[in-house]
Amino acid sequence: MKGRVLTAHGGFYEVLTEEGLYTCRLRGKNKRGEQIAVAGDWVAIEPGQQAEGTIESIYPRKNVLHRPSLSNIDQLIILSALKDPEVDFLLIDRLLVIAHYHQIRPLLVFNKVDLTADLTAIQAYYRDSYPVFRVSARDRLGIERLLDELSGKTTAMAGQSGVGKSTLINALTGSDDQATASVSDKLKRGRHTTRTTRFIPFESSFIVDTPGFNMLHLPKNLEERDLPQYYPDFMDQADGCQYRDCMHVNEPVCGVKSAVHSGILSDKRYQNYRTLLSELE
């Protein structure tokens, strides 16, 4: 029987099938193999008694991420708040690189539009390089447009604490099952409410709540020379570079640096690019 792993914790797997939900463990041969099931895996299970079962095999994955572990992701909502907490552009850029590396489509979603924050800085930073959605999860503003993008897809969600991930998931799925917590007045940060990666089925789609995405490092196999290709706004200016493998740092003739100097590209985004590049050196 085929099913999808919704959660994986402590050697137990919650697997959704057409026949219902099963709590499963891995067959011994799988435990000893190289591949361990993670949330998002499509698996073949052998049903047992009382909604229990055994995972016999794991189907090939479209992609797999680590820390947190999840697989078979189509899209990544990178969720920020327009205010409280302030937008963390470096974190967003880090998540964008991770999404591109794993061939996952990124969606930039900015919550709390009810606070009437100014979008000018965001527009100047990304220059229409990515689809941007403005929502108020609390008041359900912009939710229908975002739902259209999620239809038939598996979409993970990531962002810093306090941006309203659980509230947005509730708004998208029409459920109140996700735990929520307010932003700490003192720290202006949200208290963590997500403990385990969980795939949430709704209609023909899955949305994934993930803990710890704001602690991610760049992929360990990502090489320094490959980073520029994950910046579509930089690639648009690369025709002005003297060298095809331009890193946009020390080269004397560089279309990207010229675009930054003239204000076509954001200097802050460029400086954050150099920060990420330094992590790969």
Image: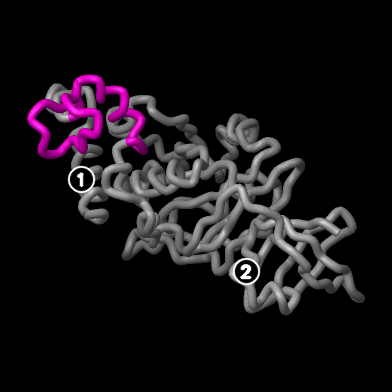
Q: Residue at x 60, y 30 (%)?
A: 145
Q: Residues within 10 Å of mark 1 (few under 14, many from 20)?
A: some
Q: Residue at x 45, y 58 (%)?
A: 213
Amino acid identity at mark 2: Ile
Q: Residue at x 36, y 55 (%)?
A: 218
Q: Which residue is mark 1?
A: 274
Residue 21: quadrant of the picture? bottom right
Residue 142: quadrant of the picture? top right
Asked if residue 91 is positioned above or below residue 57 in the image, the reply reads: above
Residue 23: quadrant of the picture? bottom right
Q: The C terminus appears in which quarter of the rendering?
A: bottom left
Instruction: Give the Cα distance between marks 1 and 2.
Output: 35 Å
The x, y position of residue 105, in whole percent, is 51, 38
Q: The N terminus appears in which quarter of the rendering?
A: bottom right
Left or right: 83 with respect to 164? Answer: left
Task: Identify the secondary structure beneath mark 1.
Answer: helix
**Which span is picked out in magenta?**
229-256
Does the magenta run of residues contain 237?
A: yes
Asked if residue 18 is positioned above or below residue 238 in the image, the reply reads: below
Task: Between residue 160 and residue 140, name the one nearer to us.
Answer: 160
* Dominant secondary-structure state across the stretch colored magenta: loop
Amino acid identity at mark 1: Arg
Q: Residue at x 14, y 39 (%)?
A: 249
Looking at this rendering, what residue extends furthest in the left direction?
252
Q: Which residue is mark 2?
A: 36
